[in-house]
Image: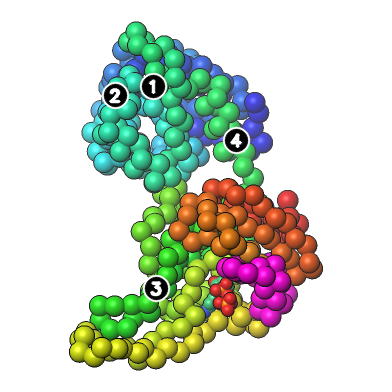
Amino acid sequence: MSIKNHNPKILIGITGGIAAYKSLTLIRLLVKAGCEVKVVATQNALQFVTPLTVETISQNKLYCDTFAPTEKFDVGHVALAEWADCMIVAPCSANMVGKLAHGIADDALSTLLLAFNKILFVAPAMNTNMYEHPAVQDNLRILKQRGVRLIEPASGFLACGTQGKGRMEEPEIIAGKVLDALNASPIFSGRKVLVTAGPTYEPIDPVRFIGNHSSGLMGFQLAEQFAALGAEVTLITGPTQLQLQLQYRNINRIDIVTAREMCDSVFEHFPNSDITVMAAAVADYTPATVADKKIKKTESQLSLELQKTTDILAELGKVKTDTQYLVGFALETDHEIENAKKKLQNKRLDLIVLNSLKNPKAGFKTPTNQIVLITREGKMVEGELKGKEEVAKDIIHFVARELNLE
Ligand code: CTP
C-alpha cells in the first residue's frame, strides 16, 4: 500500500473495546504508507492500549480527556478537525455510534467528531447482539445517510466467546480503504458543474399539483460523485426527501419547486458552468392558470388547461459555448436509440444518457438503473443494470474521458 498524495493527515479515534489492540497495527500501516497520524482515545480505550504505545507508534502526542486541562481541548478539537484530511474511528463502540448519530459531544473524541466535516470512516466493533440491535442498526443507517463511510464488521469468533458479526475489520483492509479514498485524484478540481435533479411540481390550486415519480436519486448521486472528484457543484433540485452527504462542502444545493423556477435557476448558473447535466424530470406542461382558492368538486367533470413549459435543455443547447459540455437525459419507451439520437441532435447536446423503461428495474423510482450513453460524434456505450451510485460513476468517468481529464 502506498500513497500518491503528499503526507495526508489522518486522525484515528479509538474507543473502548478489545479491538483497540488492532488500532495499533492500523496506525503503523498508515504511518508506513507515508501518512501523518494523530490519535484521539476515549478514557475506556486507555484500558486496552497505553498512551506510551500509541504515542510511540504514531510518533505524535495522544489526545485524550485526561489531557484536556493542559491541552485546552475545547479549542484543540477544532484545530485538530481542521488539521486532518481524513478521520477513522476504529474500533467504534455502540456507544460512540449512538453519540455520533445523535450529535452528543461529551468527551474529546465525540466533540472532535462533531467538529470534523471531511472524509470520515467508522469501523464498528461489538458483540453480535449489540450490533444487530435495532437501535444500533438505526444509528448506523443515520451515519450512512450522512455520508459516513462504514467499514462493516466481519464475522467470526468474538472476544466474548460467541460467534457472529461484530469483529472489527482487519487493519490491513481498513488501511487499504482509507488509502484508496485519499488516492482518489480530484480530476474535476477547478471545474464548475451544474446538475439538476428530481421532479418539478406544477401547482393547480393552493393544495394540489401535477408531479411525477422522479426520486432525485440519479441527480444527487451525480452531484456527489462530481464533488468527490473535486468539482465545484451546483445542484438544483425539485422536491425530494433526499439529503446530501455531509462531507461534500463543495456542493451548493438550491431547492426549487416548479419548472419555471428550475428554468430561472438553471439560467442563472449556466453561464459559469463547464459541465451541465440535466437529470431532472422537468414537467413538460403546467396548468395555464393556478386557482387562488381550492377547487371545489362541484362539476362532474373538470378540465385543466395546460401549457408547455420551456424546454430548458433545448434552450441551453442554443446558447452553450464550445467550451461548455452539455449532458441530457432521455426517458424512452420505444425506438429508444433512434429517439435518443434525435434528442441529442435537436437539443445540440454533447452526450445523452438514455434510460429505457423496458427494464422494470431501471428509471424513475428504482435504486438501480440501466443506461446507454450516446455522444454527438455517434459513440455509443451500453451499460449493465447497476446501483445508481455506480451508474453515476460510469457517466462521470465517461465525461472525464471525453474531456481528456483522465
Ligand atoms: N427537460 C428540460 N426541460 C423540460 C423537459 C425536459 O430540460 N421542460 C430535459 C430533462 O432534464 C432531460 C431531457 O430534457 O434531460 C429529456 O427529457 P424527456 O422527458 O425524455 O424528453 P423531452 O425532451 O421532454 O421529450 P418527450 O417528452 O417528447 O420525449
- Confirm if mark 2 falls within 8 A of ligand 1: no
- Judged by depth in the image, the label closer to the viewer, 3 or 2, is 3
**Is there CB contact under 8 Å for labels 3 and 2?**
no
> 373 or 41, which is in the foreground?
373
161 vs 375: above or below? above
Q: CA distance from mark 4 to mark 2?
A: 30 Å
Q: Label 2 near label 1: C-beta < 8 Å? A: yes
Question: Amino acid under label 1?
Answer: Gly
The kind of secondary structure element at disc 3 is loop
Q: Label 2 is placed on what type of residue? A: Met
Disc 3 and disc 1 in contact, CB within 8 angstroms: no
Q: Residues within 10 Å of mark 1 (few under 14, many from 20)?
A: many
Question: Which dot marks residue 166?
Answer: 1
- Look at mark 3 in the image and give the residue it sits on: 211
Kindly identify which residue carries mark 4: 180
Q: Position of residue 59 (x, y in %)?
A: 50, 20
Q: Is residue 369 above or below residue 288?
A: above
Which residue occupies 25% across, 81% down? Answer: 206
Q: Secondary structure at mark 1?
A: strand
Graded by Cα atoms within 10 Å as few (under 14), some (14 to 19) or many (20 or more), the crowding at tag 2 reads some
Residue range in magenta is 322-351
